[in-house]
Amino acid sequence: MRNGELSDEALQLIAGRFRLLAEPTRLKILNTLGDKEMSVSELVIATSANQANVSKHLAVLLEAGTVSRRKAGLTANYRVTDETIFDLCDLVCTRLRDQLETRKKALANI
């Protein structure tokens, strides 16, 4: 992306990926799922979010292809299927940690 030409369509897809991750509840759900499969009820308990909110965000993640759903009777179980999400989050978290450390050092010198 640095020096390459990107079409408007490619830029829209990239922006969509960042919009998907711009919601803290979705990040919490993804982080909670990790490499596990969990039901909506389990996610509600683990995230302390209400069932309607968890279901809404899971639908967005499912539509984006980030998670998959497996039905088991009346229960729907979800799992992260796009693990590149974790790579992206790790990259952002590492950068934020570095920035925080730099700010701490700067404040210590005041």
Image (tube, rainbow, N blue to C red):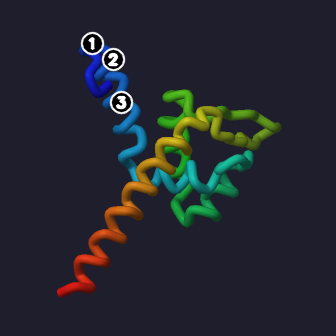
**Residue 29 at x, y = what percent?**
55, 52
The answer to which of marks 3 and 1 sits earlier in the sequence is 1
- The amino acid marked with disc number 3 is Gly
Crowding at mark 2 (Cα within 10 Å: few <14, some 14-19, many 20+): few
Report how far apart the C-alphas of labels 1 and 2 lie in the structure: 5 Å
Q: Quadrant of residue 17?
A: top left
Q: Is residue 21 above or below residue 107?
A: above
In the visual, does 30 lie left or right of 94? right
Tag count: 3
- Mark 1 lies on residue: 7
- The amino acid marked with disc number 1 is Ser
Q: Looking at the picture, tell me which residue is in the foreground, 33 or 108.
A: 108
Crowding at mark 3 (Cα within 10 Å: few <14, some 14-19, many 20+): few
Q: Quadrant of residue 7?
A: top left
**Residue 50 at x, y = what percent?**
52, 59
Crowding at mark 1 (Cα within 10 Å: few <14, some 14-19, many 20+): few
In what element is the residue under mark 2?
Answer: helix
In what element is the residue under mark 1?
Answer: loop
Checking the image for residue 10, the label placed there is 2
**Residue 54 at x, y = what percent?**
53, 50
Image quarter hosting the N terminus:
top left
Q: Looking at the picture, tell me which residue is in the foreground, 23 or 10.
A: 10
Report how far apart the C-alphas of labels 2 and 3 lie in the structure: 10 Å
Image quarter hosting the C terminus:
bottom left
Checking the image for residue 16, the label placed there is 3
In the visual, does 76 lie left or right of 4? right
Which residue is found at the position 63% from the left and 63% from the top? 46
Q: Are marks 1 and 2 in contact (CB under 8 Å)?
A: yes
Which residue is found at the position 55% from the left and 66% from the top? 48
